[in-house]
Image (tube, rainbow, N blue to C red):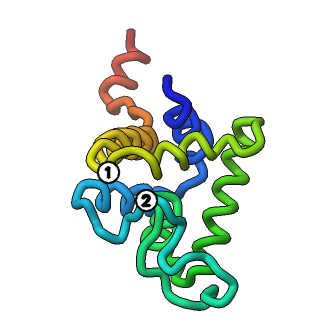
Amino acid sequence: MESWRMVWRSGLAPVLSTAGLTTLRDALESDDHRLVQGATTTPPPLMCVQDWPVEAACALGFCGWQGDGLETVGSVEEFFARCCYEADTRLGEPAACRWFLNWFDDTARDEMRRELLAEVELALAERVVVAPRVPAVRELVGARGA
């Protein structure tokens, strides 16, 4: 398995909310121009613009911005840093998140969208909770009478 996929599956996807993953899926499907490569946010995360509203974000930032309702450059940058820290901790490797981040930034947009969309859909599918099957009354009665 490629390094970026392992980091995504084991480090990043588990720390992202279902709402965040859902909005990322939608952005990947529609080629939303607000999903950007090569930057964490637009405007860039500089101290002088920490309170400005986000206009665009990378995959992780997009999850926090559009999925979790974060609005400012500073709050999305903090979310991004927390996700990276959590992923690195989960994977037991400092800067492990770089494998995903470099892949996301450096891969041709169409290929990135196709590959990441499949991973996001997989992560969402794994979150579907199936209720345990409850036996019908006649099954219970039949079992007792046997």
The residues bearing labels 1 and 2 have C-alpha atoms spaced at a distance of: 8 Å
Instruction: Name the outermost residue toward the top.
Output: 146
Q: Looking at this view, is 4 or 25 the one in front? A: 4
Q: Residues within 10 Å of mark 1 (few under 14, many from 20)?
A: some
Residue 17 % position (x, y): 52, 58
Q: Is residue 57 above or below residue 118?
A: below
Would residue 40 appear left or right of 126 to someone viewing this image? right
Would residue 69 appear left or right of 120 to someone viewing this image? right
| First in sequence: mark 1 vs mark 2 | 2
Q: Can the viewer see residue 131 in this picture? A: no
Q: Amino acid at mark 1?
A: Arg
Q: Looking at this view, is 106 or 63 the one in front? A: 106
Q: Looking at this view, is 44 or 3 the one in front? A: 44
Which residue is at 39% across, 32% downward? 133
Q: Are marks 1 and 2 in contact (CB under 8 Å)?
A: yes
Residue at image mark 1: 109
Which residue is at 61% across, 90% downward? 51
* Quarter of the view holding residue 112: top left
Residue 111 % position (x, y): 30, 42
Which residue is at 62% across, 71% downward? 77
Which residue is at 77% across, 36% downward? 92
The C terminus appears in which quarter of the rendering? top left
Residue at image mark 2: 37
Label 1 element class: helix
Q: Amino acid at mark 2?
A: Gln
- The disc at residue 138 is none
Q: Is residue 9 above or below residue 35?
A: above
Q: Is residue 142 above or below residue 114?
A: above
Label 2 element class: loop
